[in-house]
Every structure is written in C-alpha cells, then in structure tokens.
Amino acid sequence: MESQELLSLCRRRGFLWPAYDIYGGLAGFYDYGPLGASLKHNIEAHWRRLYVFDEGLQELVCPLIAPEPVFKASGHLDAFADMYVECKGCGESHRADHLAEGLVDNPEAISEEELGRILDEKAVKCPLCKGDLTAPRRFNLMFKTAIGAGSAKPGYMRPETAQGMFVNFSQIYRHGREKLPVGAVQLGRAFRNEISPRQGLVRLREFHQMEAEIFFHPERKTWPRYDGVKSHVLPLAPNGAAVTDMSLEDAVASKTIINEALAYFMWLTYRFALDIGLNPKRIRFRQHERNEMAHYAADCWDLEAETAYGWVELVGIADRGCYDVQAHLRHSGADLTAFERFEQPREITREVISPRFDVMGKLFKGDTKALAEKLIEMAPDAVRGKDEVAIEVNGDSFTVPSSCYEIIDRTEKASGEKFVPHVIEPSYGVDRILYAVLEHAYSMKDEYVTLSLEGLVAPFKAGVFPLMSRDGLDEVAQELHESLMSNGIAAHYDESGSIGRRYARMDEVGTPCCVTVDYRTMEDGTVTLRNRDTKEQVRLSRNEVVETVRKIAEGTHRSPSDALDGMKVV
Amino acid sequence: MESQELLSLCRRRGFLWPAYDIYGGLAGFYDYGPLGASLKHNIEAHWRRLYVFDEGLQELVCPLIAPEPVFKASGHLDAFADMYVECKGCGESHRADHLAEGLVDNPEAISEEELGRILDEKAVKCPLCKGDLTAPRRFNLMFKTAIGAGSAKPGYMRPETAQGMFVNFSQIYRHGREKLPVGAVQLGRAFRNEISPRQGLVRLREFHQMEAEIFFHPERKTWPRYDGVKSHVLPLAPNGAAVTDMSLEDAVASKTIINEALAYFMWLTYRFALDIGLNPKRIRFRQHERNEMAHYAADCWDLEAETAYGWVELVGIADRGCYDVQAHLRHSGADLTAFERFEQPREITREVISPRFDVMGKLFKGDTKALAEKLIEMAPDAVRGKDEVAIEVNGDSFTVPSSCYEIIDRTEKASGEKFVPHVIEPSYGVDRILYAVLEHAYSMKDEYVTLSLEGLVAPFKAGVFPLMSRDGLDEVAQELHESLMSNGIAAHYDESGSIGRRYARMDEVGTPCCVTVDYRTMEDGTVTLRNRDTKEQVRLSRNEVVETVRKIAEGTHRSPSDALDGMKVV
C-alpha cells in the first residue's frame, strides 16, 4: 500500500493531519485529532500498565527545556548534529549525507571537508531545482532557546526524555529504597530540529517517546521475571544475519543477546508489540552492527516494523554501560553512585580525594576546612584530569587548583562498595508505533477500508445504533451508549444514514464491534452484536452488552499470564 | 501552614522537587517524581473523564512549537510581555511592575517610560543587593527558537494550548458533523519565560494546562445539560463583591453570570474541584472586573483556592466572543466559519468580495480567472482594510492590490448563513491545582503528617502489609497486592519496619486505606482494613479486598448523578 491512502483516511476521519495548514503548514509537525489522540492515549496507557504497574518502574515527569550543562555532559551539545547544504537557487536545505548516498561508503561518518569534496567532484545539485549547493555545514539538531530576560541562559528542548532520568538517578535510587535493579520511565515529547523532515510520522521535528532507564549492578544484569519467560521465542536478526526464531535462553547462552536483562526487555517489547496489534510477520529485532553502535554501548537491538517506508525502527533497546550516569557524575560533581553492602565487611582499596591541607591553608585560610570537607565528598572521577575544580561554600564560589588535592588509594575495612550503575534503556517512538499499528491494521476491499485495530487500542470499543431513529429504538440505544460511557468504555452513538453506512464508518476507524437496537429488542430485550472482522452478527441480552464490550476493550492479552500463553504459539 | 513544610515533604517522598539540582537548579522548572506523576495523572484522567467522556468534547494533541503567524494572529507576539529591570550590581532581573507596587495605582498598565520615571523618582533599588537598576524594558514571555537549518523560520513554544484548537476549528467542526455547540480540549505543556519566577508550583516557566474551547452560535450560548444542574449553588464573588452562594439560574437571571453556557462550565469546574478533594470552604469564583478583562471578553470568572501564597487562580472560565477564531480567519484567509441552515430559505443580504475583472485582466492576464475564483472564496474580513492580499495559484504567489476587488452587499435567497463562532474557554492550570490539592489535604498532628487525598487522585489506593514477613503472611499479602495491581488498582506493598511506621508512611503520602494480613488471616481468611482519616480498622474477607478498594479508588463522586446529589448539600 501507499502511505498516502492511509494518511488521507487519517485526515478525513480525524486521526491526524499536518499541523498549521491554515498557515501553509510546517514540515515535521503533526496534529492528532480526536481519534488519533485516543489511539495514542491507549497505546501509552498499555505501555504504562506494563512498565509502571507490572514491572514496578517509577514514572517521572521532567521539563522539556533543559540548561546547557545537561547536554554538555550527555554529549548532545558536541555530537548531536547532521551536515546540511543549502541550495543557492531555491534556498531549500538538504541533508548532505543523504545527497552523498551511493557516492561514498559511509557518508554519515566523514568530515564536512571530505563530504564537500565528494559532492563537488560528482557535481551534485539541488534535487528540487538543480541549483548549486553551498559547502556542507554541521548543524546541531537541538532546538535552542534562551531562559530568562536580560542576561539569559541558553536552554535546549530535550532531544530525548532519557536525560531527566539520568540527572535524577539519586532520587530514583532513594525512592527505590537503595536497591538495584531500579528503574524509571518517562512518556512525553522530544524534539529534533531535522534538516529536511519527510516521511510523515516517521521523521518528525516534534515527537513522542516512551523511555525506560533501568539501573543495574554491572555484574548482575538480570530481571526477577526472566526465568518465567526465558523459553519464549523472539524473531532475531543478529549482527547483519537473516531473521531466525530463537528462545531468550538460547540467545543469552550463545551470547547473541549480551545478558538476561536485555533479553527480558526485548521480550517485554515483543509482547507489547503483539498486544497493540502489530503483525508478528512484519516485525523483527535487528541487532546493531558494531560500527553503528555508540562506542560505549555493549549491545543494541531495534524492534523494526515493515511499512510503506520500508523497515522502520520503532523501539531501540540498548545496554549503555555506565556511560550516562558517569557523564553526569563527572560534569556535575554530584555523587551519582549506588552502594552495595557486603555480606561480611571486607578490606577494600578504593580511590579517594585527599586534600593537601598545607597548600590549601595558604590559599584559602579560614575556608580551608569547609572546602576540604566538600572535596572529600566528591567522586574522584569528577576531578580527575582537571586543572581546577569549582566549589561552593556558604554561597561563595571558590576555584580550587589541582595542587590542593591528590587522588590516592585508600585501603579500609568496608561494609560495602560504591559504584556507578549500568543502564539498560528501552526507548519507544510513539508516533512511529502508532503509524505502524495503523498500517498493519489497514486493509481495503472494493474501495472499502477496514482498520482491524486491537480492542485494547481502538479509539471506540463499540458503535451503538438504533435500527431506526424512532419508535423508542433511539432511546434504548442512547441508554446503552450511556451505560458503556459511564463504565469508562468509549463508544460511538450514530443514528444517521443506512445501517450499512454506519457499519462502514465504524469499520473504517477500527471499532471492533457494533451494537444495534432493532424491533426485536423491544420485544425480548436482545440486541445484535456485529464483529468488525468477520462481519458476523450474534444476538445477546442488552444486559450483557457492557461486560461483553469490556472484554473486547481489554484486548486479547489481558493479564501477563494470558500474554505468555498467547506468545508460546507464535 | 508554610509552603516550605509541604514542599519538603514533597521532595522527601518523591512527589516533586526543583529540577536540575545536580547542576545548581533552574528557576521555574520542577520535576515530578513517581508519586507526583501519579497524582497528576489521576487529576488529568478525571478531567478527561468529565470533559471528553461525559461532555463529548474532542481531544486534540497539537505541537508545542508553533510558527510566528499563529502568534501574530493571536496577539501574543505583540502583547504577551512584561517589563523588567536588571540590577547593575548583581545582574538579577526583576519584574518592573512588581517593584512599583504601592507606588502607583496600576503598574501593569503604564508605559515603560512612565514606569522608569516612577522607579527613578522613588529611588527604587535591587531588592537583593540594593544595587542600581537599568531602565525598564519590555520582554516578550514566549520562548523563541528557530525551525530548520540555514535560513530558519522563527518559532515559539506555545504559551497556552488554546491556539491549537482555534487554528483547527474547521477540523473540529467537520468532525462534529457541522453542528454547534462543538468543542475540543487539550491537555499538555505550555511555557512562559517568566522574568523572575518564584512561588514554587504557582509560577512556573514550564507548566501543564487542561483547556477546553467550546464553539457556539453567538445567540445560543447554552448547554444540553444546563437544565439538570441549574438549581445548584456556587460560591460567587461578582465584580469586586464578597462571596455569596447563588444558584446557576439566579445568577443567569440576574445577569451576574452572562449566559447559561458559561454558568454550566463554572458548575462543571466546581464539581471537578470537589471531586479531586479541594476544600469547599477554601475555594471561590471571583469575577474579573471590567478593567482586568481582555477587551474582547464578555465575562470571565476565576476559580480561586486559598493557599499559603494567598488566593491563587486555578482555573479561568471566559466568554471570549468571536475574538480568537476571527483573528485566525483574518490572518490566514481560511474560511473559519460555521454554517447554519434556516428552516425556510430566506432573502438575506451579506457581504462578499467582488473581483474587478477589468483591473485584474490588465495586471494578471491569463491568471485572472484563477485569482478571481480564489478571491471570491475568501471571507471579506480577511481582506478588509488591507492594501493588498497575497494569493497562491498553482504554486505561484501573486500580490493582488485592493483596486482589484471591492466588498459589496449581495442579496440572495439563502438556505442558511455563515458566521464566526463564539468561544467559551475553561482553562485549568494543572500544577497549581495539584499544589492546592496537596495543601488542602495536608494536616499535621504531633509532628505526624497526614495527606487526606481523595481516593480518586491518591497515588496509591491501598497499602498492603504482612504483620510479620514470615509464616506465610508475606506470601498472602503479596498475592493480595498482585490481585489489586492486576485489576489496575495502584497499591503499595511494604514489609519493612513496625506496622505503625508502615501506616505512618502511607498516611504521609495520602493512601486512603491499608490492608494488613495477620495470623487470623491464616485461620479465617479475613484481613484488617484501616481507614487513613479515622484510623479505624475493620475486618473483612480477603476476597472482598479488591472490590472494596476499587470503590475507594473511584472516589466519593463516582457517576455524574452521584456528584449532583453530593453538591446539593454543599
């Protein structure tokens, strides 16, 4: 199918449309209409149910604007950039690496100068107007702003929700009563100032993420529920190879997947994908090859879905080592470590910062004691290799040169040890997932569209119609509609047009069933229930409608154990 | 009480804390921790239940970044500004009008020059360091950014969610099958680059809104459910007067509230406030006085709550006339009108744009026909008073001078008429509401805090404890905990510390009840259920726990009709 057919249905029926069209539109921005907002809400609610309710992770809601030091530490300020060229004719900007595709092996990985030389050599022109292009320039993809009036601070719209969890590690750890593993999630917006956004919902400048950051002891990367699911099978495409079905335990034993925790969150992702109605024949896990993975990542897998745009990454699940927490520890000087108590006290040797009181005394006089105390509290990694360190005491700022302290090994009887936790990160792109769900649900027969959405995510769980809008049929149907709604079940009441047209309108927006009140209802209290996918109708008592539709609304995989059963046969 | 005590509890127990504290903090930004995120989620879910499920309004999700024309039309670009001064000593920025309070009658309403003269005259200094101040400057409160690489477009973080609904009026109207009233809602972030944010959650630079925009025929501002609630009583402080209890119908009849629709949404706001646990003795509706209301607004009421910061606006409910839709119609040229069919066709006279083909022919030659067709489609208000109008035809842009057309009256037999809809806007500030809910729920006795949160919004609906973590008590308690969770009821399992300490921990975070498994449970299958507010305990069968806690979780006012009953006695 073409994405255009689906996107036109989406606009017509109020799922989604390009934003700001009365002002000529703005590339990379979409509006969700009432049906799209509901579908998105249902996808997010199920994710929250799995990650927060079932797995016990802590939900945070952090700001979208962050100050510069956060992205200095995370690496986004220096490295989150693409190269672009502008057309001297029409003024349009293009991704320079995209224009060089096929001309050089790895256009993303070479320098501006090198890329400029290649585009020049091959006389590459503007793909829109054949005009000449400027030399490639590097462009940071964060939206920048300024915080405050007057001498404002630079701020950036977050490019991912993740940093909010990393900077709050100590809060998360404390709230989890200082035990590992512990994890947090965020659902919300993120921003990338794409140079030339295309492909509808797949490449947006403003998008929605659901991310989890789960913190582990470096040597114990497993998850309490792993044993219950390890025999389940996932479709894995490891390290450039074709897809093969493999159980979690075989994948971990053969080192195809690096550890049990990563395998578990891949399983949870797969389960989520099936629950919300992605087609199991059109999804796969593709492992990142060594050269596409960040240098600090130990292993990374993408859940990909087949769509009109090709295979598209919906979810990335990575073992990021200690990179993120370590980076914030080093830049902020805060003690972002976890502590593990030994069963028996042990002699251990660890690095500590040792103030040189003789040097400090001369420099800082009466402030020496307070400054030394602050130094001792700091993590050695926060000062290592620096010429000086800034310390605040009682509201005054001091610059303490490295001659004032040394990093020494200290051996002592310890009841436990401090360490920087490792992170496993499942990162979900909501808009892409929603698009893939729509595409996998879409079918057309005789110019008649059906969206076979799962009950769990469908915007309406039922259509409710009177066969005729008279003779009291309408009143009974309205009562049924209200009893569904007051039970929290989204239903759509419709009395206009032929009954066939009303069924068709509901099929087109993915409503799993329709309830019709007819003349027999007035005699025996039964109504018809029509199944969207089989088009079959059954009669049932009007008193059974709420419970029947509730089951449909809860989806096929209601409880974790149902889901396990469902997955064994995949 | 002091807000500090509550905010310190909030940080300690994971409700919320100032953001980015490992980097020294950032004024005006907060993080919600797991309990705060849950409380916020529950407040939003109830609002969605009332506005989307019960009232049938359409939920939209629009981008946070918008291009400049949107805010040119809305007036924010020109008028959404405060005046600030900077301290020449410490560099801190201050609101200039705040410094002039008490020195002049209405410091917000005077010019920069006038304000500068007054501050000078009275020798006002920096409140922090007594340093000299710069002259006042005007500062637009929108966060600005740039969209795209190279020749980027200016963009702004939305200062309210409302504009997304106004620019999408045609989509909303069509989705509502072209009938009025019709309405849309948005829940989400908004941004104001406050000059000097203080007061914790009450004045944030990044905050959360829940807004509804309901579109009416200008002469029919009522709501289908109005009659069912018109005898209910609201605490009204009209036009500077003291609070008096008045029924909706009396308020409308005496023109205290301008129309039935506005009265209905004030009622809905009051109901919402009681449902989520605001103290009826500490909330009131205060009417805007004529000089504080926007010039286009016909009437405006704030729901205010008494807090440690004084009486704080939580919700604003305004009749905004046709201002918003009209502004976007005029700036975009799009036909943002509604159409009402007459019962009988009528002769009506209306303004239309009439192209002057003689003038146009000379200027535009072969493009005249296409341009004239576009002109005829435009709304007269979109061109009135302009010297020229920009029109696009087949991808080419033309500037058509006003000599090419005239606005004339045309009388014709019409089946109906077009008009710009009027808007009633209930606008809720989530963070302030959440703060007021916490404050109204807070009480301290003997250094022991209880948060008496409504079950509907409480982060945990129940604590579940084994009396001892042995002899199988812990297993039974864990099973109970899981059966609550798998029914979607948030519960907290705790087996550490004395039972008294565990109760206290739950009281402190507002958990309405605690279920304890003791030795008698093993004999007769009963558990204790303790009430947070009365501290009373009852025994019930463990099989009744899920349904009992579910009722508590649904709150006192479960269905609309229960809520009505509850409100009659207020």
Image: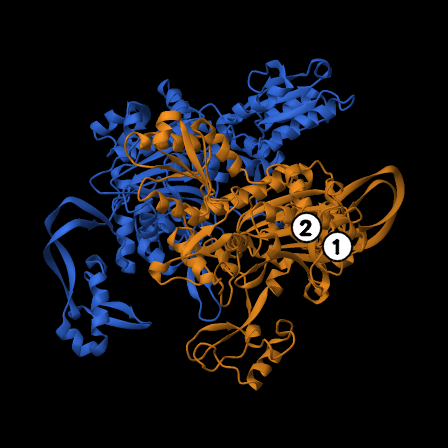
Chain colours: A blue, B orange
Residue A89: give x, y in percent of width and height. Answer: 50, 53
Q: Is residue A136 in view?
A: no
Do callouts 1 and 2 point to residues on the same chain? Answer: yes
Residue A466: give x, y in percent of width and height. Answer: 71, 22
Q: Compared with residue B255, is residue A254 higher up or lower down, i.e. above or below?
A: above
- The residue under label 2 is which amino acid type? Met
- Please state which of residues A280 and A456 is positioned toward the viewer in this rendering: A456
**What separation in Å lies between label 1 and label 2 (alpha carbons)?**
10 Å
Q: Chain of mark 2?
A: B
Q: Residue furthest right?
A: B347
Q: Chain of mark 1?
A: B
| Disc 1 + disc 2, Cβ < 8 Å | yes
Q: Residue at x 42, y 50 (%)?
A: B508
Q: Report which residue position mark 2 lands on.
A: B266
Q: Is residue A15 in view?
A: yes
Residue B226: give x, y in percent of width and height. Answer: 74, 43
Residue A282: give x, y in percent of width and height. Answer: 41, 25
Residue B462 falls in image quadrant: top left
Q: Report which residue position mark 1 lands on.
A: B257
Residue B558 falls in image quadrant: top right
Image quadrant containing the C terminus of chain A: top left
The residue carrying pointer 1 sits among few (fewer than 14), some (14 to 19) or many (20 or more) residues within 10 Å by Cα, namely many
Q: Earlier in the sequence, mark 1 or mark 2?
A: 1
- The residue under label 1 is which amino acid type? Ile
